[in-house]
Amino acid sequence: MKNILTILLLSSIFYSAFAQQACATFTEIPLRTFTTIPQNECYYLKDTNNELNDYVGTWKAMWNNKIVFVTFKKIINKYNNTLHYNKDYLIASFKTLDINGNILYDNTFLDDDSKKIKGGKFRKADDRYSLVYIDLCHTSGDIRINFNNLAKTELQWNYLQDKYEWLDSDCFFYNYPPDQLPNPLPKAAIFVKQ
């Protein structure tokens, strides 16, 4: 079993490296491209206007007697195995505390590839940046962020959590009543840049 896992891991690394190195140069297209990008070609969805830079850093919000710190980091020119092209995007980690400062959730120690919040792109419909959150026992949802002021020191946060309809029996809160399921992130909040 160990040999099979090793072979699969090495194959995945080789395929990913081959897919990235197959292109000597990339055709750069702006991050705000709203048309379909051809797969398996040498495209790079680039933050040409450096819009993502304004989100980078640590942000703080309070909600329901909790304090949450979200730290955004910009990833540059990374190959996306699902989309099959390179892109710039945000990732985020967070720490949630109760009102007394006790840590309720903390994933700030995870490496970049293991982050629970990963960015997508700007939405054409409402100009918000869209991210996906996947964490505890398949807890997941969509996060949409945008600036709340011209100084870009306040961030409007909206989190649309998926329903817990697909929790499996291995999840440690499988039998919890719905009102006791974990809620590590606010549904809506204003974050202030730290």
Image (tube, helix red, strand yellow):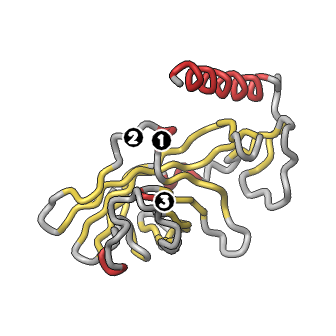
Q: In this view, does 21 lie to the left or right of 148?
A: right
* SS label for mark 3: helix
The residue carrying mark 3 is 138
Q: Which amino acid does label 1 sit on?
A: Ser
The residue carrying mark 1 is 114
Q: Which amino acid does label 2 sit on?
A: Leu
| Quadrant in the picture for residue 86 | top right
Residue neighbourhood size for the residue with mark 1, other residues' Cα within 10 Å, grouped as few (<14), some (14–19), many (≥20): few
Q: Residue at the location (60% across, 63% down)?
A: 130
State the quadrant of the C terminus. bottom left
The label nearer to you, 2 versus 3, is 3
Q: Which amino acid does label 3 sit on?
A: His
- Is 84 drawn above or below residue 53 in the view shown? above
Residue 29 at x, y percent in the picture: 80, 46
| Mark 3 to mark 1 CA distance (whole Å) | 14 Å
Residue 93 at x, y percent in the picture: 40, 50
Looking at this view, is 77 or 148 the one in front? Answer: 77
Mark on residue 131? none
| Mark 2 to mark 1 CA distance (whole Å) | 6 Å
The residue carrying mark 2 is 110
